[in-house]
Amino acid sequence: YSKGKNEFLLGNYDKAISLFISFASSSPNSLNIINSKLWLARAYSANEAYLKSKDAFLDYQSNNKEHSKYADSMFELTRVLIKLNEVKEAKLLLLDMIKQYPNHSLINKANQLLLNL
């Protein structure tokens, strides 16, 4: 997991993706598995593999609503949906994020993005 995150931060997205996928298959019960799913989604997005990123964000979100980065993932998924020209879905997700997390650190960016759509 740490190696994957480091590769991501260095801009080596293909390597990061490989490491996160490998980590998920070799350590499915790790405490970092949830975080690795989020970082995998981010790595796909940074690599402009938007369909894979969308699937990875949805996988992360499917069972982790209480995770500390859930609201972040909503905002990040919105940006992926925009890249995929799924603007209606992006708007709905932003509205949901704004409603659920009105005090989140990304709320101003979320409101601005919504106005721009």
Image: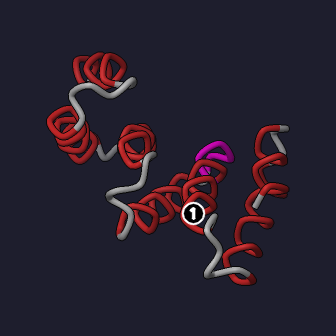
Q: Main secondary structure of the magenta part?
A: helix
Q: Can residue 82 be seen here?
A: no
The residue drawn where x is 71% and y is 72% is 21
Query: Which x, y percent locates residue 27?
Result: 71, 80
Quadrant in the picture for residue 82: top left
Residue under numbered circle 1: 37
- In the picture provided, is 115 more to the left or to the right than 64? left
The residue drawn where x is 34% and y is 56% is 66
| 85 is within the stretch colored magenta | no
Per the rendered image, the range of residues in magenta is 44-48
Q: Secondary structure at mark 1?
A: helix
Farthest residue to the front: give it. Answer: 31
Which sits in the foreground, 27 or 11? 27
Amino acid type at mark 1: Lys
Quadrant into which the C terminus falls: top left
Query: Which x, y percent locates residue 9?
Result: 78, 38
Which sits in the foreground, 93 or 3? 3
Quadrant into which the N terminus falls: bottom right
- In the picture provided, is 114 more to the left or to the right than 40? left
- In the picture provided, is 22 more to the left or to the right than 81? right
- In this picture, is 38 found above or below 88? below
